[in-house]
Image (spheres, helix red, strand yellow):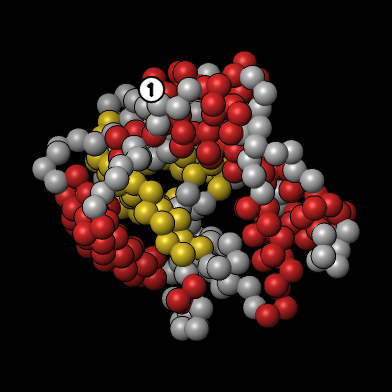
């Protein structure tokens, strides 16, 4: 893996999202396209399939899958059990640390060190619990400062092993933007900060950036392959899944937080994007992400 400029590293932002070991509840049917963060999962039992872009991968027992950030569909055989870690790692400008070369499968036997490190991370987070679902792993908690520090240290130790594994597989890290790219970084920062409850005003994002609305849309499409409204919608979908899976927030309140006037509007919108109603998603534990 190419060396990364050490001056960039202090700005790297890492967020640990989950580690779980459990059977997959949604089985023997293809999911809708779902937004996933980077991560890795080991197929401990059963079998799965992943569709990412124009590729479809079959994942038999004993396989590890390295997930790229983005959209995908997935299918799992009944009784499939996964050991999974999800996280975010981005440069200050919002670009992911790893982007190319992921959505790949490898025999778990070639990744013994990473498998052991993932087991250690699971024990650090969940103690002696034999099984923890995605929903349980992503449930909000209020750890003490000391507990939070220990968990973050455990994740950083795991992350170092993960990075070493990618290096051995030849997966490169993606560089952050350099000095000439500040405008694009500012566009993404403004889009990420736009309140989910308010309609997007592209002119407001473009204000003061020496580019019109159309030019902003062209820049974003070239960088992320998304329109500004699609970027905001993706943030809303992610927030909806997080609130449904990890909280008991009423649907009416979630709808309001996402800028939808009524719970019925939220239900229709969510079904269109997730393939099920918000209530059904919450009942099944929101276990779409693997």
Q: Position of residue 279 (x, y in %)?
A: 47, 18
The quadrant in which the N terminus is found is bottom left
Is 129 drawn above or below residue 228 in the view shown? above
Compare residues 135 and 275 and report the one nearer the observer.
135
Q: Position of residue 137 (x, y in %)?
A: 30, 40
- Image-based side of 35 in relation to 168, left or right: right
Residue at (42, 61) in percent of width and height: 14
Across and down, in percent, residue 110 comes to 27, 59
> Is 195 placed left or right of 249 in the picture?
right
Residue 247 showing in the rendered view:
yes
Q: Residue furthest left?
A: 128
**Could you tell whether 126 is left or right of 255 in the image?**
left
Say whether residue 264 is left or right of residue 19: right
Residue placed under numbered mark 1 in the picture: 284
> Residue at image x 49%, y 73%?
11
Q: Furthest-top residue in view?
A: 264
Mark 1: secondary structure:
loop
The local crowd at label 1, few if under 14, some if 14 to 19, many if 20 or more residues have their Cα within 10 Å, is few
Q: State the residue at coordinates (31%, 68%).
A: 160
In depth, the one of 49 and 280 nearer the eye is 280
* Number of residue marks: 1
Q: Is residue 115 visible?
A: no
Q: Nearer the viewer, residue 5 or 202?
A: 202
Q: Quadrant of the C terminus?
A: top left
Instruction: Give the residue drawn at x 24%, y 52%.
Output: 144
Q: Is residue 158 above or below residue 59?
A: below
Whole-percent x and y of residue 90? Answer: 51, 63
């Amino acid at each position: 893996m190419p060396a990364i400029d050490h001056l960039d590293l202090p700005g790297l932002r890492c967020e640990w999202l989950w580690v779980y070991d459990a059977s997959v509840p949604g089985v023997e049917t293809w999911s809708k396209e779902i937004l996933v963060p980077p991560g890795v999962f080991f197929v401990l039992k059963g079998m799965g399939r992943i569709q990412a872009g124009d590729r479809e991968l079959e994942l038999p027992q004993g396989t590890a899958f390295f997930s790229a950030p983005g959209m995908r569909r997935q299918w799992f055989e009944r009784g499939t059990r996964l050991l999974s870690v999800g996280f975010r790692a981005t440069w200050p400008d919002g670009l992911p640390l790893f982007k190319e070369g992921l959505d790949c499968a490898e025999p778990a036997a070639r990744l013994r060190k990473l498998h052991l490190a993932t087991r250690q991370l699971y024990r650090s987070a969940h103690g002696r619990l034999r099984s923890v679902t995605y929903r349980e792993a992503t449930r909000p908690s209020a750890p003490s400062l000391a507990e939070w520090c220990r968990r973050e240290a455990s994740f950083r130790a795991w992350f170092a092993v993960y990075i070493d594994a990618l290096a051995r597989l030849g997966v490169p890290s993606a560089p952050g933007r350099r000095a000439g790219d500040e405008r694009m970084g500012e566009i993404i920062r403004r889009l990420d900060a736009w309140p989910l409850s308010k309609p997007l005003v592209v002119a407001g994002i473009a204000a003061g950036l020496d580019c019109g609305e159309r030019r902003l849309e062209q820049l974003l499409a070239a960088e992320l392959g998304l329109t500004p409204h699609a970027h905001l919608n993706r943030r809303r979908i992610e927030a909806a899944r997080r609130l449904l899976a990890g909280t008991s927030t009423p649907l009416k309140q979630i709808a309001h937080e996402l800028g939808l006037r009524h719970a019925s509007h939220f239900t229709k919108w969510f079904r269109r994007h997730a393939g099920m109603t918000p209530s059904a998603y919450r009942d099944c534990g929101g276990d779409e992400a693997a």
